[in-house]
Each structure stands twice: as C-alpha cells, then as structure tokens.
Image: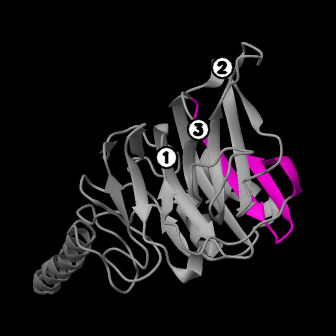
Amino acid sequence: MNTVLLAAPLIVFALVLLLGFVGCGLNTKGSGTGDGETGQTGPDDTPPTPPDPYVEEVLASSPIAYWRLSDPPGNLAKDEIGSPPSGDHPGEYQGNVTLGQPPGLNLSDPNATPARFDGTGFVEVVHDSVFELSTFTVEALVHPDSIVATGLLAGSMSPPPMQGAPSTSGGWALSIVPRSSGDHPDIAGYFAAVVSDGSGPDGPPPEPIDLAKLGTAWHLAMTFDGTVLTLYWDGVKRAWGTFPYAPNTQEQLQIGVAFKGAIQEVALYATVLTAEQIGTHYLANTSPDENL
C-alpha cells in the first residue's frame, strides 16, 4: 500500500509531462506561421501566385521587346524587356485608348487586361536601331470589333500599309484589312502580313475573317527569314511567299493605328520562331493547364 502511494506522484508527474508535449505539438501545428525547416505553410500564409504560361513561353523565346498592353490608365506602354519600371522601349498611348477593362485576351492570366482601341488611338514606340531587323517575328493577341479601314495591329512602315500602295520606307506590318465590295457577304475582312523594300508593301494573299466570328479573340504571328514571309493564325501556318524587304530605318513602331477592338501581348523577336514555338505559344493561351 505504501509502495502504491509513493508511486502515485511519479505517475501524475509523467502524465503532466506527456500532456505538455502533446499540447506543444498541437500549438505548433495551428500557429498560422510557416515552418522554415520543413516548408510547411500555415493557414495565415499567402499562397504563391501561379505562373502565367503564355507570358512564360513568350519570355523563354527571348523577344527584344514585349508590350503586354495591360497597363494601368496612363500614358506609358511598358516594355517587359529591360529595367523596371518601363523597360527598354516603352511606348506612349496616343489618342483614345481605353485601359484596365476586362475581359482579357490572355486566358492564362485573367488579371491582365488588353488595350482597347476605337479607331483613333494607338501606341507609338520611338524608333531604335535594334528594330532594324533583317529577320524577325512579331506576334499578338487580337480581338477586332469591326473592320472599317486598314488597321495596323503592329508594324513599322509609312504610310499605313495597303498592298500595292506607294511607300516611302521599308518595313513590316501585321494588319487587318476591310472586305471589298465584290467579296462574299460572309467575309468581314482579312488579316494580312506585309513587308516593303521602299517601293510598296506586298505579302501573301490575306486570310479572310468569317463575319460570324468577328469579335473573336485570336493569336496572330508573322515571321520573315530574310526571304520568306509567313502568316500564322491560331498556331497554324496560313499564308506565305517570297517578297522583297528592307528594314525601316526611320519610322516609329506603332500598334493599333486605325484599329477597332482589343490588342494584348505584342512581342517582337530578332529571330524567326519555328512553327512549333508559335504553336506552343498559342496552346499556352488556350489550354494553360496542359502547360503547367
């Protein structure tokens, strides 16, 4: 009997120690702070921002300039290439361009909004010798609302690019062209890729836009390898041909001139992206989950 009484305090003391250790474990697990050694995240920690597949693919292809056009309202079109805050080749919004309004064209980044043009506003980037390219790729996400004039999606050429029109300089242009009076009534207009050597822009036959699909967002790209000009539409090679070209040495680079609709993610490369790369960019936007 005496032995049991003597052992009782020891048993109670052991139980207190055991409950103390369990309580410490429970408090640590529910503290809401991250565990620096194990990498565990508590309930109060902010989860990391998920990657943007489309932007990642563009940057991995090493553009020399990249205007997302997802800027807050103001005058500056940030270039993602170069030092913050504005990059190497920022553009300026001229005229009436609406910024910061959803929906966006980049499905893999729902927080990004495009620049919306009403036919009078545009983006202008000061000419730089790095834009005097002998080979290049340009791509963009576009959403035309209507086609009433030849609109410049992106380009460096003067005057506004129209096949067969006179030109005072070399250069290139990715354009949207209105339908002609003799066209099929189901055709709303055309996407066109043109280059010029100073004697007049020319390019492969423009690709028709179905009137029923006007107002759809598309991925467009054009490449020039020094000889062959190629137009891609939603990752597919649609038109190509051999045309004379000389780099523009004086005109500003412009985006959205005489265009009605939204434009986003304009990238310029000093290299010719492969068909596989362009297809990967398109898929990164339309099927982001497949590229994570």
Let me know if residue 6 is in the magenta part: no
Residue 116 shows in this picture: yes
Most prominent secondary structure in the magenta stretch?
strand
User: Considering the numbered disc 3 on the image, is that residue within a helix, a strand or a loop?
Assistant: loop
The circle drawn on residue 211 is 2
Q: Please report the residue visible at 72 percent of the width from the left and 75 percent of the height from the top.
A: 271
Residue 235 shows in this picture: no
Q: Amino acid at mark 3?
A: Thr
Query: How far across and down, in percent of the image, does residue 179 sit?
Result: 68, 25
Q: Please report the residue visible at 48 percent of the width from the left and 40 percent of the height from the top.
A: 258
| Pointer 3 with pointer 2, Cβ within 8 A | no
Disc number lying in front (3 or 1): 3
Q: How is the image coloured?
A: one colour
Disc 3: CA contacts within 10 A as few (<14), some (14-19) or many (>=20):
many
Query: How far across and down, in percent of the image, does residue 228 sit?
Result: 86, 62
Q: Which residue is mark 1?
A: 263
Q: Amino acid at mark 2?
A: Leu
Q: Which residue is mark 3?
A: 150
Q: CA distance from mark 1 to mark 2?
A: 19 Å
- Name which of mark 3 and mark 2 comes first in the sequence: 3
Q: Please report the residue visible at 49 percent of the width from the left and 39 percent of the height from the top.
A: 259
User: Considering the numbered disc 1 on the image, is that residue within a helix, a strand or a loop?
Assistant: strand
Query: Magenta region: which residues?
Result: 216-242
